[in-house]
Amino acid sequence: MSVAPLNLPSYKEKSPEVAARFDRIRARPVVLSIRNLKKTFDTKDGSHIAFQSASLDVHRREFICIIGPSGCGKSTLIRIVAGLEDSSGGEILIDGHPVSGPGPDRGMVFQGYTLFPWRTVRKNVMFGLEMRGKSTAVADVEARQWLDMVGLGKFEGSYPHQLSGGMKQRVAIARALANEPRILLMDEPFGALDALTRCKMQNYLMQIWRKVEVTILFITHDLEEACFLADRIVVMGANPGRVVEVIENPIPRPRSTEQLLTPEFLALKHRLDELIHAPAETDDEKLPMIKLTEAGDEVE
Amino acid sequence: MGLRDRLGLRHELPPRRRFVLMVCSFLLPLAVWSIVSYVPWIWHPRVRVTDPGGVDYFEAGMDVDRDVFAHEAANAVKAGLKAPVGYRVNPKYLPPPHKVARAFVTAFTTPPRLPSEPWLLESFGLSIRTIFWGFFISSIFGVPLGILCGTYRFFARLQEPFIEWFRYLPAPAFGALCVAILGIDDAPKVAIIVIGTFFQQVLVIANTVRKVDPALIEAAETLGAKGWRLLTGVVIPATIADIYIDMRILLGWAWTYLIVAEVFGTMSGITFFITLQGRYNQYDNVYAAIAMIGVIGLACDMTLAWLATILFPWKRSRSSGRRRIKPVSQLIAESPPTGAGELNFTSSPPAELPGGSVNPAQSEA
C-alpha cells in the first residue's frame, strides 16, 4: 500500500487574493458566536461528554463547514444552535444577543427533508411566512419568488411526494430562506442523495448563497463537499467531541468542479483526511485473520 | 401462471386476477350455500309431508325429522295403513339463495302485518339514526380529547389510565343503567353506542397522533411556529388523514354495537324487524335484513374512502396520482412505520436542472 509521495503545497498556503478575501471576511460583523459550548448526556454509567468547550465566531455571509467523524457531536452542536436541544454550558449569541429555544432567525435544513406532506410546494414555503404573521397574499408572492430562485417555480402546485429527493431539498432550502434567517443551519442536507444529485445540489447551493444575504453553517462528513463549499472548515474530533482545527480554505472563488483536481484542493483534502482518519487506523478496525476460501488465485 | 406465480409470498397480483379473486370471495360461500340448498341428498334433515297417509298427526305441508318420518312410515305400513309421502327439505332457518334474493325486494315492499309494526325501510332509518347520533356524540368529545392526549403528556396521564380501565367494561353491561337514566326510547340505545365507541376512540386517536413525525415538529419550530400553532399547523394536519382512517374503523365497531343497543328499552330498528320476522318464521327476510346491514356498512365505508381521496390529495398513490379507494384492511397494512422520515431514494427523476424538461408531477392537479 505504498503511494508515491504527494508533492503538494501546504494546505495553509494562500494566494494573496485569497488572503485578502479572508481579511475582508474577518472585518465583517460576527453573526453567530458560539462561546464555550458544552454538551453532556446523562447515561446509566455516569455522564457522557458529547463535546466540550466549542467556540466559534461566524462572520456575516461566511460559509462554514463543520466536518468530523460520527460521534464527534457535530449534529448535536448544530441542533443546540438551532435551539432544538439544550446545552450543558456556554452560550450562543446571534448578532451579540444570547438566544435560547428555536426561532425563525436560525433557519434549518435537515437531512430528512421534513417538508410538510399535506402542503403543496408553495404552501410549504409559505409556512414560515404565515407563522411570522404575514398576510396570505404577501406570503404567496414571496413564496413564489423564493421558488423561482431555487428553480422550482413550475412545481409550486405539486405535493412533496411527487418530487425527487434533490427537488425536495431545494424546496426545504427555499422554505428556510423565505424566513430571511440571520444564519442558515444545514445538517448533512445532501447526505441522503446520490452522488450525482449531491454534486448538482452543491452547485445550486453555491449559486443561491451568492444571490442571497445569508450566512451558512453546514454539517457534512464528506471531505470534498467541505472543501468545495466552505470558506472555513471546522474539523471536529471524537471521544470526547472537540474542535480540532479550524482551516481557512485556500481555494479561490468562484469555484467549479474542475478545481477538484488542483494541487490546492488535493492538499486541503489530504490534510482533512489526516485529521479525520489518522487516529482511527488502529488494531480494532482490522478483522481477525480467518480465511474461508480455498481458491488458489489470490486476490491482489 | 405457475403456482409460484399465484402463491408467491407477498407477490403482487395483476389487476384482472385481483378482481376475479374479489368476486370469488363472495361466490365461494354462495356456492356452498347453493349446494346445501339445491342438492337434495346433501343434508336436508327434514321431510315435508305431502300426504299424511295413515299417520294421524301428520298434516300436508308439515315438516318432520327424517328419522321420525321413517319410523312413522314403518309403523303405518306395519299396521296395514297407507304410508305417508313427503320430500326432503332443509330446516326453515336455512332458506335457499333465491328466496333470500327475492326477499331483498319483497322485504321492502311487504307491508307489516300489524299497523304498529315497522316497514323494513323505517327500521333501517331508525337504526341509521341511532348509529349516527351515537357516533356523532362520541366523536365530538372523543376526537378532540384523543388529539389532546396524543399531543400533550399532561392530558395523556390525566385521562388515559381511567379510559384504559373503562374500555374493558362491555357497553351492553350499561344497558339497564341507561334505560333507568334515559328512559326506554332512543336515548339509551344512542348512549350504549357512545359508551362502546368513545373510550376506544380516545385511545386509538391518541395513538395515531403520537405517531406524528417529530422531525416535522422540529422543522416547524425552526420556522417560527410556537404553542397552539404547532398543534393546529402541524400536528393536526399531519395526522388528520390517519385519524380519518381510524374513524372509518371505529364506525365499523359502532355498527357492531347497534344490534345489542337496540334490544334495550323498547326494541326498535333493524333488530326489532329481524326478531319479528324470526317470530313469523320468515327467515328469508331475516337473512336479507342481515345482509343489508353489511351492504349499508360497506357502502358507507366506500363512500368515506372515496371522500378521503378528495379531502387528502397528498395521500394519493405516489407514482400515478390516481385516486384509489382502498378498504380499511389494506390501509392498515400500508400505514407507515412510526418516525420514519420520508427518505425515498428509488424514484428520482432523471434530471435535476431547474430549466430542464422534468415533470414527475403530472398528476391530475
Image (tube, rainbow, N blue to C red):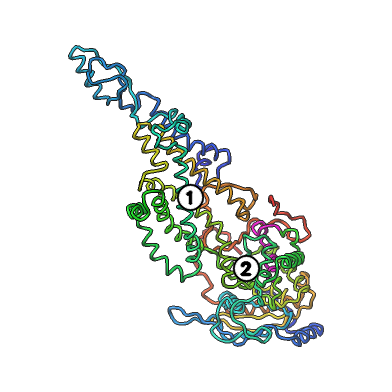
Label ID, residue A111: 2
Asked if the magenta segment contains residue A168, the reply would be yes
Whether residue A130 is visible here, answered yes or no, is: yes
Q: Position of residue B96 (x, y in %)?
A: 41, 28
Location of mark 1 (residue): B132
Q: Are marks 1 and 2 in contact (CB under 8 Å)?
A: no
Q: Secondary structure at mark 2?
A: loop
**Quadrant position of residue A279:** bottom right
The residues tagged by marks 1 and 2 sit, at their Cα atoms, a distance apart of: 45 Å
Chain identity of mark 1: B
Q: Look at the image and say whether residue B328 sits in the magenta stretch.
A: no
Q: Quadrant of residue B90?
A: top left
Q: Residue B32 at what x, y percent from top left?
A: 41, 32
Q: Amino acid at mark 1?
A: Phe
Camera-near label (1 vs 2) is 1
**Are the numbered discs 1 and 2 placed on the same chain, yes or no?**
no
- Amino acid type at image mark 2: Gln
Relative depth, front residue between A190 and A183: A183
Residue at 46% x, 69% y is: B155
